Image (spheres, grey):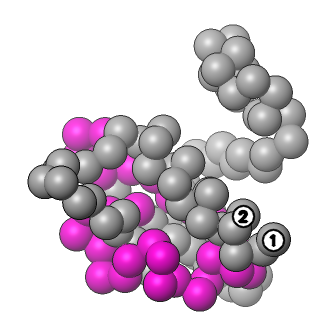
Amino acid sequence: GMTAGAWKTSAGTAARTPVARCTNLTRALEAYKKAGIAVVGLAADGEHEVGDLAALSGPVVVVVGSEGKGLSRLVGETCDFRVRIPMPGGAESLNAGVAAGVVLYEAARRRA
């Protein structure tokens, strides 16, 4: 479920954006992969850069880890792609919400 605070800060977007909740994330990601959906995990040390990832043009699941630890090892290994966001200016990382926004924007831009 979503908290009242999450609904409020989404400014209505939560009503139009599919969000999944599951009890076993790795199992759910494997099911998405079997259905032909690319699984993209956000990771500061990702092998791919978000701007170069063609998978964002099609059906995709975006996995955002915790702000402190990122993706768990098993979830990271389950992802088809581990993606990093370029960080000019020496910044180390973005918070989870901002990072998700950057990736969702890039996916929307490619689909326009």
Q: Is residue 48 magenta?
A: yes
Query: In the image as oriented, which residue stretches furthest toward the front?
Result: 89
Q: Which image quarter: residue 110?
A: bottom right
Q: For the residue marked with disc 2, what is the amino acid?
A: Ala
Q: Residue at x 81, y 27 (%)?
A: 12
Mark 1, residue position: 112
Residue 76 seen in the current view? no
Q: Is residue 10 magenta?
A: no
Query: In the image as oriented, which residue stretches furthest toward the right?
Result: 16
Name the foreground residue: 6 vs 31: 6
- Secondary structure of residue under mark 2: helix
Vertical arrangement, residue 9 with respect to residue 32, above or below = above
Q: Residue at x 25, y 49 (%)?
A: 93
Mark 1 crowd level (few <14, some 14–19, many ≥20, 10 Å Cα): few
Q: Residue at x 30, y 73 (%)?
A: 46
- Secondary structure of residue under mark 1: loop
Of the numbered discs in the image, which one, if any, rests on residue 108?
2
Q: For the residue marked with disc 1, what is the amino acid?
A: Ala
Residue 100 seen in the current view? yes
Vertical arrangement, residue 21 with respect to residue 108, above or below = above
x and y, in percent, of residue 2 in the image: 68, 25
x and y, in percent, of residue 27 in the image: 56, 66
Q: Which image quarter: residue 14?
A: top right
Instruction: Report how far apart the C-alphas of labels 2 and 1 lie in the structure.
Output: 6 Å
Query: In the image as oriented, which residue stretches furthest toward the top?
Result: 4
Name the foreground residue: 40 vs 85: 85
The reply to whether discs 2 and 1 touch (Cβ–Cβ < 8 Å) is yes
Q: Residue at x 63, y 48 (%)?
A: 22
**Residues drawn in magenta:** 42-70
